[in-house]
Image (spheres, helix red, strand yellow):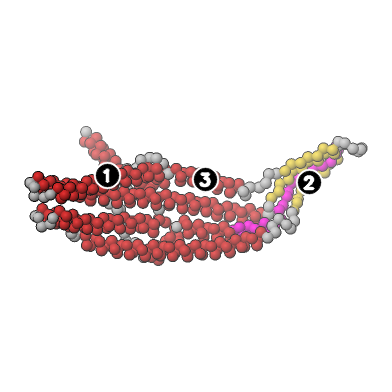
C-alpha cells in the first residue's frame, strides 16, 4: 500500500513538472517549431530542392547504337555494328560541382533557419504580449474593486443628500470604464491565444505565466555583434552567397576542360569482325565562352553586396542597441519612482477621510495610473526589443 501511494505521488509530481515546463516560453517555442505548418512545408521543400541539386551532378545516360546494313551489292555477309558509350565531363568538374551543391544545400538550410526564427520570434512576442496583458489585468482588477468601493460610498452619500447626482454619475462612469477595460483585455488575450494556436498548427497552447522569464540586462554591444555574426542566419546567408559565387567561378574554370567519351564498339560481317574501345574528347571552343568572366563579375558583386548589407545590418543593430539602453534607463527610473509608493491606497485613504473631493481624487488617481501603465508598456516594449536583439539565439 505504501509503495502504491509513493508511486502515485511521484507520478503527480512528475506530471506537475511537465505541466509547468509546458507553460514556459521556451517549451512553447519548441512545440511551435515542431507543429508549425509553414515550417513543416518549408522543410519538405528544402529537402526536395536538396535532392534536386544532387541530381544535377549525375552522369548522363549511356548511349547505345546499332547498325544492320543488309542492302546493297556485296559478296560478304550483311554488315552489322553496335556501340555503347558513356560521356562525362572532366573528372574535376564533378568534384567542383559537388562542393557547389553542398554550399547551395547549406544556403537552403539557412533560408529555413531565417523563416524559423521569424516564426519563433513572432510566437515569443505573442507570449510576451500575454504576460503584459496579464499584468494589466491584475492592475485593472484592483482598480475595478476600488472604483466599486468609491461608487458605493458616493451612492451612500447621494442617498443622504450629501453629494449631487453629477458626482454620483462620475463615480459610476469611472467604475464602468474600469470594467470595460477588463473586457477589452480579456478579448485581446483571447485573440492572441488564437494567433498562437495558429502558429502551433491549430493545436491550442496553454500559457499561464504572468511574469517575464528573462533578465533585461544584456551583454556589451560588441559581444552580441560578434555572436550575431557567428549565429545569425541572415548574416551567414550573405557569407554563403559569397562562397557559392566563388565556387561557381571554380566550376566555370573546370568546365573549360574537355568532356570525355569512352565505350565499346563491334562491327563487321559474318566470319569477319572488329571490336575494341571507343574514346572521344570534345574541343572546348565555344560552350564556355565568357562564362569564367561572368562568374568573376558575380564574385565581385556578391562581395560588394555582402559588405554593404553587413554595414547596414551593423548600423541598424547599433541603433537598436542604443535605443534599448535608453529605454531601459527610462524604465529603471519609472521603477525606482513607482515601486516604493502605494499611491492609489494613499489617495483612497485621503478620499475616505474627506481630504479630497471625488474630482480631485479621480484626477490624481488617473495621473499615477497613467504613469504605472506607461511603465508596464515600456517594460513590454523592452522585452520585444530584447527578443529582436537576441533573435539569432532562437
Residue 173 as seen in the image, left or right of residue 110: left
User: Which quadrant is the N terminus positioned in?
Assistant: top left
The residue that mark 3 highlights is 45
Give residue 204's quadrant in the image.
top left
The residue that mark 2 highlights is 276
Dot placed on the residue nearer the N-terminal end, 1 or 3: 3
State the residue at coordinates (56%, 46%): 51
Q: Position of residue 189 (x, y in %)?
A: 31, 45
Q: Nearer the viewer, residue 133 or 258?
A: 133
Dot placed on the residue nearer the N-terminal end, 2 or 1: 1
Task: Find out whether residue 304 is within the magenta segment.
Answer: no
The residue sitting at the left extreme is 160
Q: Position of residue 225 (x, y in %)?
A: 42, 63
Dot placed on the residue nearer the N-terminal end, 2 or 3: 3
User: CA gap, disc 2 to disc 1?
Assistant: 90 Å
State the residue at coordinates (29%, 64%): 329
Q: Position of residue 310 (x, y in %)?
A: 48, 63
Residue range highlighted in magenta: 247-271
The residue that mark 1 highlights is 183
User: CA gap, disc 2 to disc 3?
Assistant: 47 Å
Residue 104 as seen in the image, left or right of residue 320: right
How many other residues sit within 10 Å of disc 1, few (<14), some (14-19) or many (≥20)?
A: few
Dot label at residue 241? none
Residue 34 as seen in the image, left or right of residue 259: left
Q: Residues at badges 2 and 3 in contact (C-beta under 8 Å)?
A: no
State the residue at coordinates (27%, 62%): 332
How many other residues sit within 10 Å of disc 3, few (<14), some (14-19) or many (≥20)?
A: some
Amino acid at each position: 500500500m505504501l509503495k502504491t501511494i509513493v508511486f502515485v505521488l511521484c507520478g503527480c509530481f512528475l506530471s506537475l513538472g511537465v505541466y509547468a515546463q509546458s507553460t514556459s516560453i521556451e517549451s512553447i517555442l519548441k512545440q511551435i517549431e515542431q507543429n508549425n505548418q509553414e515550417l513543416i512545408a518549408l522543410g519538405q521543400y528544402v529537402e526536395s530542392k536538396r535532392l534536386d541539386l544532387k541530381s544535377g551532378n549525375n552522369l548522363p545516360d549511356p548511349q547505345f547504337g546499332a547498325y544492320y546494313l543488309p542492302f546493297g551489292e556485296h559478296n560478304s555477309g550483311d554488315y552489322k555494328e553496335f556501340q555503347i558509350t558513356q560521356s562525362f565531363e572532366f573528372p574535376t568538374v564533378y568534384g567542383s560541382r559537388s562542393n557547389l551543391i553542398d554550399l547551395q544545400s547549406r544556403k537552403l538550410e539557412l533560408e529555413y533557419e531565417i523563416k524559423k526564427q521569424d516564426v519563433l520570434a513572432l510566437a515569443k512576442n505573442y507570449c510576451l504580449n500575454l504576460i503584459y496583458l496579464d499584468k494589466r489585468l491584475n492592475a485593472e482588477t484592483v482598480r475595478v474593486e476600488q472604483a466599486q468601493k468609491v461608487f458605493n460610498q458616493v451612492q451612500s452619500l447621494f442617498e443622504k443628500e450629501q453629494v449631487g447626482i453629477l458626482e454620483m454619475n462620475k463615480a459610476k462612469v469611472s467604475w464602468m470604464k474600469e470594467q470595460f477595460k477588463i473586457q477589452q483585455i480579456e478579448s485581446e488575450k483571447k485573440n492572441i491565444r488564437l494567433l498562437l494556436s495558429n502558429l502551433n498548427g491549430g493545436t491550442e497552447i496553454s500559457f499561464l505565466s504572468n511574469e517575464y522569464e528573462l533578465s533585461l540586462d544584456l551583454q556589451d554591444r560588441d559581444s552580441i555583434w560578434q555572436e550575431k555574426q557567428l549565429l545569425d542566419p541572415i548574416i551567414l546567408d550573405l557569407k554563403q552567397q559569397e562562397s557559392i559565387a566563388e565556387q561557381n567561378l571554380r566550376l566555370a574554370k573546370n568546365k573549360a576542360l574537355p568532356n570525355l567519351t569512352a565505350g565499346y564498339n563491334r562491327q563487321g560481317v559474318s566470319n569477319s569482325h572488329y571490336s575494341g574501345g571507343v574514346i572521344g574528347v570534345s574541343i572546348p571552343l565555344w560552350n564556355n565562352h565568357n562564362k569564367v568572366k561572368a562568374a568573376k563579375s558575380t564574385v565581385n558583386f556578391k562581395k560588394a553586396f555582402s559588405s554593404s548589407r553587413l554595414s547596414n545590418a551593423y548600423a541598424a543593430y547599433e541603433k537598436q542597441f542604443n535605443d534599448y539602453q535608453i529605454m531601459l534607463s527610462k524604465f529603471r527610473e519609472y521603477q525606482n519612482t513607482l515601486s516604493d509608493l502605494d499611491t492609489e491606497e494613499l489617495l483612497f485613504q485621503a478620499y475616505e477621510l474627506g481630504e479630497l473631493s471625488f474630482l480631485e481624487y479621480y484626477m490624481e488617481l488617473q495621473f499615477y495610473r497613467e504613469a504605472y501603465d506607461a511603465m508596464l508598456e515600456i517594460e513590454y516594449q523592452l522585452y520585444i526589443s530584447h527578443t529582436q536583439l537576441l533573435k539569432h539565439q532562437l
